[in-house]
Amino acid sequence: MKHQINVQNLHRLFEAVKDDSERLELIYGYLLWFSDYHQAIFKSEAWRRLYNARNTSTKDYQEKIRAFEERRTSCHNDVLGCVESLNRMAESFEIPAIYDGTISRDPPYRREVADAVLAYVESIILERR
């Protein structure tokens, strides 16, 4: 079963906190982490397509890749925490889970959460006004 961000439950959460500016800002911050993770992946992958050991020194190349991977991992871990927090907040309003899969830093769950978050980011972009 492919797990996804449940947009209906997320919108129910938006509605539940619409008059609570602190919670709205908190949710907005979580969603920005989704975007930060997406951006970390894109920056890393774009850089890898442009640079290689032939057009930069091996040392510089390895350092840059390591820095990208550290940023990507950090953002991924932050996203896992954001999804957990969204689920807890939804639960506090008796709203079903925003993400109903297993949230873990262990494979394959780590990748499943990431895929769901990235699909949600893509849906926001595709549905823009």
Image (cartoon, grey):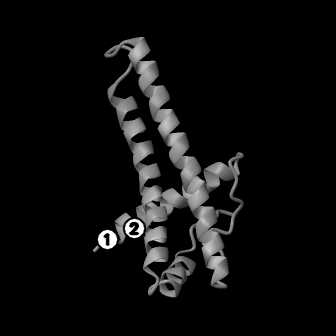
Of all residues, the one furthest to the front in this rendering is 22
Left or right, residue 93 beside residue 74: right
Of all residues, the one furthest to the left in this rendering is 129
| Looking at the image, residue 14 lies above or below residue 47 | below
Describe the element under mark 2 as helix, strand or loop: helix
Is residue 96 in view?
Answer: no
Tell me whether the residue at label 1 lies in contact with that at label 2, contact meaning CB atoms closer than 8 angstroms. Answer: yes
Describe the element under mark 1 as helix, strand or loop: loop
Q: Amino acid at mark 1?
A: Arg
Considering the image in quadrants, where does the N terminus appear? bottom right
Rendered location of residue 70, percent (x, y): 51, 35
Left or right, residue 26 beside residue 43: right
Rendered location of residue 107, percent (x, y): 70, 45
Q: Amino acid at mark 2?
A: Ile
Rendered location of residue 111, percent (x, y): 62, 49
Q: What is the crowding at mark 1: few (fewer than 14 residues within 10 Å), some, or many (at least 20)?
A: few
Residue located beneath label 1 in the image = 128
What residue appears at the point 48 percent right and 39 percent down from the top-left corner? 71
Residue 124 is labelled as 2
Considering the image in quadrants, where does the C terminus appear? bottom left
Q: CA distance from mark 1 to mark 2?
A: 6 Å
Left or right, residue 120 beside residue 81: left
Rendered location of residue 81, percent (x, y): 60, 57
What residue appears at the point 55 percent right and 48 percent down from the top-left corner? 76
What residue appears at the point 37 percent right and 40 percent down from the top-left corner? 43
